[in-house]
Image (cartoon, helix red, strand yellow):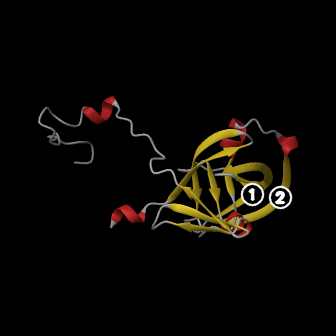
Amino acid sequence: MTQKLKPLYLKVLIEGRPLSRVLVDNGSVLNIIPINVTRKLGKTAEDVIPSDVAISGFTGGSVETQRILSLELIVGDITTMTAFFIVESTAAYYLLLGREWIHYNFCIPSTLYQMLIFWDGDEVKIVEVDNKPFIAKVYHADAELYNGEFVPVRFIGKDSKG
């Protein structure tokens, strides 16, 4: 059953460039882009619209968005100009698509079936989600915590706290 609890991550084209780790979240009202992603897309101060909107984050804290950026977003074969609120944060996603984008595109996100369903007139279009949005990496520090039998290494001794 835990396989059905995965979030919806997409691979999209943004301004003609491929981008993975795009989270579809029907719990969010707005579309969000971290500021570091706007820099990677080569966007400057001339590309943004000033904003003084404060949004509430997952932890309940308030984050002020000072800019809005409009970008061409392609999901499957659906192309829309999408407004993103720029936030200063580190996140597990490169873009977050909220209810504004979902409703505008007549989209039904399904975490159960891991797909997006679009209505385009009388036609139904289905977009599969990215099932592996993250790459697992093993670092040297991880390997040193295990001995040759793949059991946790037991640390013996006292630190400054006893």
Asked if disc 2 and disc 1 are in contact, CB closer than 8 Å, the reply is yes
Residue 50 placement (x, y as % from top left): 86, 54
Q: Which residue is mark 1?
A: 65
Numbered disc 1: secondary structure: strand
Residue 45 placement (x, y as % from top left): 84, 42
Rendered image: mark on residue 141: none
Residue 141 placement (x, y as % from top left): 31, 32
Q: Residue at x 49, y 47 (%)?
A: 133
Residue 64 placement (x, y as % from top left): 73, 59
Numbered disc 2: secondary structure: strand
25 vs 16, nearest the viewer: 16
Task: Characterize the local packing of mark 2: few (<14), some (14-19) or many (20 or more) Cα atoms within 10 angstroms.
Answer: few
Rendered image: mark on residue 51: 2
Quadrant where the N terminus lies? bottom left
Q: Residue at x 80, y 51 (%)?
A: 70
Q: CA distance from mark 2 to mark 1?
A: 6 Å
What is the three-letter code of the residue carrying label 1?
Thr
What is the three-letter code of the residue carrying label 2?
Ser
